[in-house]
Image (spheres, helix red, strand yellow):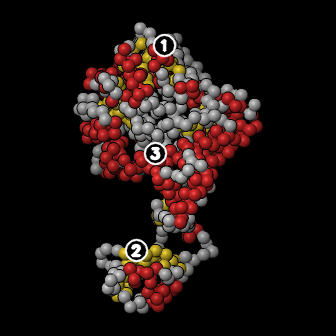
Amino acid sequence: MKQHTVQTTTKKKRLSRAVSSIEPSGIRRFFDLAATMEDCISLGVGEPDFVTPWNVREASMASLEQGYTSYTSNAGMIELRTAISGYMFDRFGVGYDPEEEIIVTVGASEAIDLAIRATIDPGDEVLVATPAFVSYEPLVTMSGAVPVPVPTDASTDFKLTKERLEAAITERSRAIILSFPNNPTGAVMNDVELQAIAEVAEAHDLLVFSDEIYAELSYDTPHTAFSALNRMRDRTVLISGFSKAFAMTGWRLGYVCAPNDITQAMLKIHQYSLMCAPTPAQHGALEALRNGRETVEKMTNSYRARRNYIVHALNEAGLTCRFPGGSFYAFPSVEATGMDDETFAEQLLIEEKVAVVPGSVFGKGGEGHVRCSYATSMDALQTATARIEAFVQRHAQ
Amino acid sequence: MAVTKEKELELIRILEHHGRIETDVLAKMLDENEDDVKNCMKKLEDEKIILSYGAIIDWNKVTTEDHIAAMIDVKVTPQREVGFDEVAARIQRFPEVTALYLMSGTYDLSVMVEGQTMEGVARFVSNKLSTLDAVLSTTTHFRLKKYKHDGVIFNQEEKDRRMVVSP
């Protein structure tokens, strides 16, 4: 990677303390390494291998042909918000007012940022169930608040427990960020397990930012929306989007559902920073919600079969891997090789040209594991797991 | 232990598109025992649910083989008691016929014929198909190019445009 040194004559500091205090994503560092390899099989990709369904692409193109090229309302097209409202009610049994309680955002990532910035003050503590998506902790830090990791681990199947959560709570705790099905562990929490977390949130008056971007990719149990739990609707900011379920990562289209006071606060930031989500993408998303059910099921069935395959193959290769209930990641332990996860991932890339992501980049609890995305072809999975097996055999202790 | 109905359906869906996949891989994909999967496949074959394991070939790329195909619209006189089935049974036995469908609309049967030369196809139509008593008329359309077949798009480069590693 090229190194650039900037000579500056500026006497004052150029960068904010908030940004200077955070590290670049560990995934980015690994990407730079993997990008230099030829013929690399990548299990490092956190996005579907499907192209966005044709009807969605076609709807977006048709909207351009019809001249829908101007801004939409800040909160997003009302037709789309109404469709999101209907979808949330039909699929997860929780209702939101499309006029006041839903905002269409530029990806779920923006929604997470908005949720934190709209509700958290500097000095507040935000609990983050880890391993977790790499953005959560830096976004908390950049808002001036303090991220407090609450580790999950293999002993609880990477599910968050009431006891662990309570142990991390202080007087400054304001909110908790949850994401189940989880990236990177694939862990899923059922309604009973989530209810235990809900009771803690209520007892300590915590807001809950529930990132449910992988809701459609729950393979063995129906997904429970956190806000559908008893008395949780008023303290939950539900975040989701179109990237994972509808294979629309590059469209950058997400949404947030929350009580009116929170969405209106979020909308202030959204209108000054982003104005609105891209209009053609909103038209595509509307088609996805109206006519995309069958495609989602086909893609989910395909991921389920690949999940089953990779878990069996990794275990046979000598890496202990539990059955992840959702998302599209397997999260095996690399303990059998005696390596830490960073070394394992780096050596595997160099020796076998298979890219996986070290678990530690996702925070505490991720150490000793690697994230293997199975959102790739069966051919690639078979080759990758054969190479991993050869690698583990060479390095097994 | 037998494979459940749900898993059986999943197996069929996989095999429909990936007929060559090996049974040990299939077993892992279905989270089932390999012997159970083999038994299930045998049962599906016996029940004539799985009829054949084929490949979709782009014959235009096989330069040594001339290949031509035609779709023939056929109007027939339905037979008492058996309707169109009897004449369909006769037509489907011709080795040149690769597919045969009963249609609604302006004609009755759609016959897909494949051969090595245009003359061969023409000979089949004039000598074999048209001469059947029940056949009233035929309209032959020669296929010029195949864009999509059985859900597979031809001449499509499958390129993974994703980054090697992403969040």
Question: What SS does tag 1 mark?
Answer: helix
Quarter of the rendering containing residue A40: top right
Give amino acid for label 3: Thr
- For residue A248, above or below residue A106: below
Q: Which residue is mark 3?
A: A300
User: Residue A270: where, in percent of width, then height?
Assistant: 33, 27
Q: Are marks 2 and 3 in contact (CB under 8 Å)?
A: no
Q: Residue at x 55, y 57 (%)?
A: B40
Question: What SS does tag 3 mark?
Answer: helix
Chain of the residue displaying label 1? A
Numbered disc in front, either 2 or 1: 1
User: Residue B149: where, in percent of width, then height?
Assistant: 47, 65
- For residue A123, above or below residue A345: above
Local crowd at mark 3 within 10 Å, few (<14), some, or many (≥20)?
A: many
Which numbered disc covers residue A167?
A: 1
Looking at the picture, tell me which residue is in the foreground, A153 or B150.
A153
Looking at the picture, tell me which residue is in the foreground, B148 or B132.
B132
- For residue A332, above or below residue B148: above
Q: Which residue is mark 2?
A: B101
Q: Residue at x 49, y 54 (%)?
A: B8
Local crowd at mark 1 within 10 Å, few (<14), some, or many (≥20)?
A: few
